[in-house]
Image (spheres, helix red, strand yellow):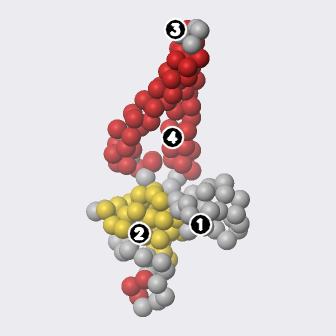
């Protein structure tokens, strides 16, 4: 997956990048870029030394994107269902306790994911990379932001 983005700020060997909406996207909103208020931000390894304001090409392996989506969406959903099943077994008459247990399992999965955030960042599979600088704000061109 290759996308264009603007470097927002530096974080050592990584940079925070705001993804740019494709002109072909329109306003379908599937990736939340259809709404001007919702920018997709990601952290990318900055081996090309891009600076704040530079328009860059960012890439992430398709397998990494799918794995990250599985971790962020499917695992918590599975936690919710497992919590609901456990709640049905232990709290047969209480729908509120069953729902609470389901939400608790889902929240626990999110906490585990958040605690492993740095580990995921170190894994090349889940880390986006800045491939090249498409336009530099520092070359006397029109500012990008």
Q: Earlier in the sequence, mark 3 or mark 4?
A: 4
Residue named by callout 2: 8
Image spot of residue 31 (x, y percent): 62, 55
Q: Classify mark 2: residues with Cα within 10 Å, few (<14), some (14-19) or many (20+).
A: some
Q: Earlier in the sequence, mark 1 or mark 2?
A: 2
Give the alpha-carbon distance from disc 3 to disc 4, as whole Å. 28 Å
Give the alpha-carbon distance from disc 2 to disc 3, as whole Å. 49 Å
- Mark 1 vs 3: CB contact within 8 A: no
Asked whether residue 59 appears in the rendered view, the answer is no
Vertical arrangement, residue 74 with respect to residue 20, above or below: above
Image spot of residue 20 (x, y percent): 56, 68
Asked whether residue 84 appears in the rendered view, the answer is yes
Q: Residue at x 41, y 69 (%)?
A: 8
Q: Is residue 11 left or right of residue 29?
A: left
Give the structural element (helix, strand or loop) at label 4. Answer: helix
The numbered disc on residue 90 is 3
- Mark 4 vs 1: CB contact within 8 A: no
Q: Earlier in the sequence, mark 2 or mark 3?
A: 2
Give the alpha-carbon distance from disc 1 to disc 2, as whole Å. 16 Å
Residue named by callout 4: 72
Q: Earlier in the sequence, mark 1 or mark 3?
A: 1
- Mark 1 vs 2: CB contact within 8 A: no
Image spot of residue 57 (x, y percent): 50, 69
The numbered disc on residue 123 is none
Give the structural element (helix, strand or loop) at label 3. Answer: helix
Give the structural element (helix, strand or loop) at label 1. Answer: loop
Image spot of residue 3 (x, y percent): 56, 64
Q: Earlier in the sequence, mark 4 or mark 1?
A: 1
Q: How many marks?
A: 4
């Amino acid at each position: 997956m290759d996308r264009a983005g603007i470097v927002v700020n530096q974080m050592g060997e990584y940079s925070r990048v705001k993804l740019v909406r494709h002109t072909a996207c329109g306003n379908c909103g599937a990736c939340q870029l259809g709404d001007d208020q919702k920018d997709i931000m990601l952290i990318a390894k900055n081996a090309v030394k891009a600076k704040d304001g530079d328009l860059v090409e960012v890439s992430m392996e398709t397998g990494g994107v799918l794995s990250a989506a599985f971790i962020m969406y499917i695992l918590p959903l599975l936690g919710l269902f497992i919590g609901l099943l456990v709640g049905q077994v232990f709290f047969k008459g209480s729908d509120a306790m069953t729902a609470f247990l389901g939400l608790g399992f889902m929240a626990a999965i999110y906490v585990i994911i958040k605690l492993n955030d740095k580990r995921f960042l170190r894994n090349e599979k889940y880390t986006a990379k800045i491939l090249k600088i498409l336009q530099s704000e520092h070359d006397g061109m029109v500012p990008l932001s």
